[in-house]
Image: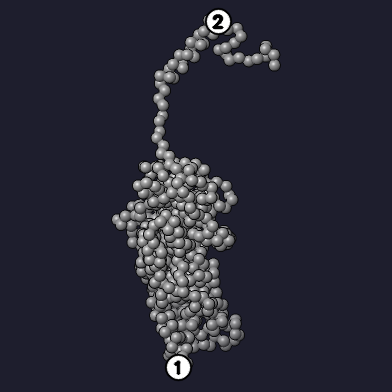
Amino acid sequence: MTMKEKSYPEWLTPAAGPEDLLDIVSRAFAGIRRGRETFAPQLAAHEVGRVLSVSTATAKVSGLPGVGLEELLQFSGGGFGIAFDVDEHEIGAVLLTDYRDLRAGEKVLRTGRVMDVAVGEELLGRIIDPLGNPLDGRGPIACRQRLPIERPSAAIMDRAPVAVPLQTGIKVIDALIPVGRGQRELILGDRQTGKTAIAIDTILNQRETGVISVYCAIGQRAASVAKTAAVLRDRGALVSTVVVVAEGNDPPGLAYIAPYAATSIAEYFMEAGRDVLIVYDDLTHHARAYRELSLLLRRPPGREAFPGDIFYIHSRLLERATRLREGLGGGSLTALPIIETEAQNMSAFIPTNLISITDGQICLSPSLFELGVLPAVDVGRSVSRVGGKAQRAAYRAVAGDLKLAYAQFEELETFARFGARLDPETRRTIEHGRHLRACLKQPEFSPVAVPAQIMVLLALTAGLLDTVPLEQMAAAEGCLSGAAALLPGDLCERLITAERLSDEDRLQIIAIARDALLSLQGRLDGPGADSSLRQKEET
């Protein structure tokens, strides 16, 4: 480019004379002078500490005199930690990232905020870690709001009674151990007895109810979490679910904050007036992670080597589950914590803590599991302390008879094993109990709707299923479920909303169930096979 082709600003051209250049320089100096006079330096004080020592998942930090408990700390290498122990001369920090990248002598900065997590509608259908980072490979999550993971629970005057049921779709739970929205119901049992399956079935049953679900996996294998996520996705429940994952190979600090982060996510929806279900799977790993961190930070161990405040750790987590009064939106947060027992020892330290915190427990029996009675719920040891008031009237009409019949059956079945001679009435009670236990069986990932449950349970209490061979109980239940789908719409509405089950509705349902079973028995056994049912009908 030649000199003639060069371009100049309008105020500086080759034709400018000495006077023009002098004026330009004067104006430039005047602007600099004004900027210097109006400039006010922005000074900010930053507290900088140093890493004294690093151990597995924890670090000792010096300096930072103004740090607060559970404040988020940032290391010069980009990692994060939480101020867990605040002493006079040093700070015990729990690391949330890989400790192998941290060295003694590195700088530590205060962030001025406690540990928080992103919340919002954008999290629905996503799989994240406790820090809010996506794990499903679908790109970043753009949430506009964050909440602290540790928040005070709702005040007593802000709470409402548990009066609305949370249908799990599992017959034995909805009928005998009902759960209400805003309740805390513990699920406990030995390893491999179906604890997670009950929680996943409950989440699947919320697809059409508008309930938001939060599944928090603590210390689980990545393969198990991937399988659970695939089940939720394939059955259409993931779109209304948030999955928070702290894998087994993650730092114990992530396992410790995982349930608190998941609860803050759930509280966002609850405070917006939504009903939320949260599953902690499981708090055994959470307690072990807290014990590991505490012992690394030299906290004195208590009973069974757990620090004495482990009860407070879990109580302040589960107390956040509640139902808000209508003035605050009427939202609810229902908690289903899972705990693992050893040899059915419910009197161990952590199980007894959680039993005393929650509003009831669903106990799973390995003996029933080995017998193929799935879900393996031990009705005698399970209880729901507040869910009965939230149970639908149609269930209450049959629940008392079912509990009494099941308890009598278990007593008599144990007695009959000794080979004693039984009278006809006792044999009928045992046979009815066997049909009851077969009726309460349910395949995994197959929640049952309310009308179908009511029809099956009413047919059971009326004795219509006692003449059905045990090997044909599954076919009989399928037939009754099909008949329930054809019930009149007004009858289905009354089953869900009515305050009591009228005699007319009961008789109508039993008559429909009887006709369905007669038709099934006629198809299976040919002409004349329905004589036993007809004889019972005449009786």
* Residue 491, quarter of the rendered image: bottom left
In the image, 308 versus 7, the foreground residue is 308
Residue positioned 41% across, 37% down in the render = 46
Residue in the picture at 37% in, 46% down: 89
Is 27 drawn above or below residue 93 in the view shown?
above
Q: Position of residue 523 (x, y in %)?
A: 60, 81
Disc assigned to residue 420 = 1
Mark 2 near mark 1, Cβ–Cβ under 8 Å? Answer: no
Q: Nearer the viewer, mark 2 or mark 1?
A: 2
Q: Nearer the viewer, residue 98 or 286?
A: 98
Secondary structure beneath dot 1 equals loop
CA neighbours of label 1 inside 10 A, class few (<14), some (14 to 19), many (20+): few
At x 51%, y 47%, the residue is 102
Residue 135 at x, y = what percent? Answer: 56, 52
- Which residue ends up furthest to the right in the rendered image? 1
Which percent across, then down, holds residue 68?
Answer: 37, 46
Q: Amino acid at mark 1?
A: Ala
Residue labelled with disc 2: 18
User: Quick one: which residue is furthest to the left in this view?
Assistant: 157
Inspect this view and state whether residue 72 appears.
no
Relative height, residue 342 to residue 67 (above, below) = below
Identity of the residue drawn at 41% across and 75% down: 381
- Residue 354, label in figure: none
Mark 2 falls on what kind of element?
A: helix
Alpha carbon of mark 2 to alpha carbon of mark 1: how far? 126 Å
